[in-house]
Image: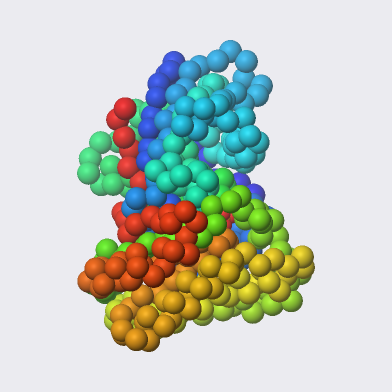
Amino acid sequence: MTEQKFIPRKYTNTIESGKVTWESPSNIALVKYWGKKKDQIPENPSISFTLNNCKTITSLSFSKKENTSDFEFEVFLDGEKKDDFKPKIETFFKRVEVYLPFLKYYKFKIDTKNTFPHSSGIASSASGMSALALCLMSIEKQLSESNVASGAVEASLNNEYFNQKASFLARLGSGSACRSIEGDLIVWGKNKTVEGSSDLFGIKYPYKVHDNFKNYQDTILLVDKGEKQVSSTVGHNLMFNHPYAQNRFNQAHDNLDALKPILESGNLDAFIQLIESEALTLHAMMMTSMPYFILMKPNTLEIINKIWTFRAETGLHISFTLDAGANVHVLYPKNEASKILEFIKNELVAYCQNGHYICDQIGLGANQLTM
Ligand code: DP6
């Protein structure tokens, strides 16, 4: 399947070499993406908070080459050569080549680093793939610059296309990466609730969001920093022939629909119920697949129970969500942050590996850097 809209016209500029840099954030899903079809098409819609502090910073250096039959690139993480990252990037390049025909005409050096520890169990694929997609878009922009008509209207349309194609490309690297280009709430996956939603790229949530959700906090408790037991690709495949798959996909549509009035009215109790149920459903899908997995650790459950008790005792709006791992994202509104953070430090950090946790909050998306 090729999307004509993202195949560029012939490039008008020739550039010998250059370097572009982007920083791109991670994101945390409220309604989860779990299950995909061919070509990275999600089985159900998802919606996420873009994060602010957990980011990947990627510089892409490029120079023209003679032999145009293969991709040529090297990858460095924190200055160290990482050949084990290459297969995933090679697959990504193959998938996006038709949309970025310059790929085989340059050799690339990908220099990347994360603001969070690599071995934190936090997936860097969303921030990493979105940062790389944005770097590639910046090169495409330079190659086509003279095509760009001047004037405010064209410029803004152009920016929209840039972000949309960046999200489209990022999706082909890692599904959730398409939700990391912009902020602060992003929807991916076609559905009836959100107008303009698409399976091909993420869009900004276009409806009213109550002030309760502005600067929403996410404290990430690092329960288990080890390698993931189940890679997300293997995980998504578990939804094939899963006995509850179709109900789960329908439920994600229903939950997104239910979230709209919650986001508008600022009903935090309803919000908490919905996102915690989503997190536990994600893990329930893993526990009931064949083969089956338990990705939560005893400390994950300790934390969840502590959160529930504290919430019942104080009436504060502390809640949790989970990724496909043991770490816990503790979500809460900004105006309750001081009491909740005190509770986290006093009661929850003890369950983290080496006492490690990361304070983050909802953010506005990726930025290009000049360096
Ligand atoms: C549980 O985006 O990592 O975090 O498309 O195979 O790269 P691939 O999967 P990935 O899956 C993320 C799944 C999740 C839920 C979510 O972020 O929506």
Confirm whether residue 129 shows in the render: yes
Residue at the spot x=57%, y=61% of the render?
325
Report x, y in % for residue 207: 32, 70
Q: Is residue 197 above or below residue 110?
A: below
Q: Give the camera-side residue of 82 and 181.
A: 82
* Relative side of 335 to 48, left or right: left
Q: Give the camera-side residue of 37 and 113.
A: 113
Report x, y in % for residue 39: 64, 52
For ligand 1, the image quadrant comes to bottom right
Residue at the spot x=37%, y=80% of the render?
310
Tell me the quarter of the picture where residue 143 sits. Answer: top left
Residue at the spot x=31%, y=84% of the render?
314
Task: Look at the image and tell me in which quarter the C terminus lies.
Answer: top left
* Relative side of 8 to 250, left or right: left
Q: Give the camera-side residue of 258 and 28.
A: 28
The tally of labels here is 0
Q: Give the camera-side residue of 272 and 44.
A: 272
Report x, y in % for residue 16: 44, 15
* Relative side of 136 to 280, left or right: left
Residue at the spot x=42%, y=46% of the render?
116
* Colour mapping: rainbow
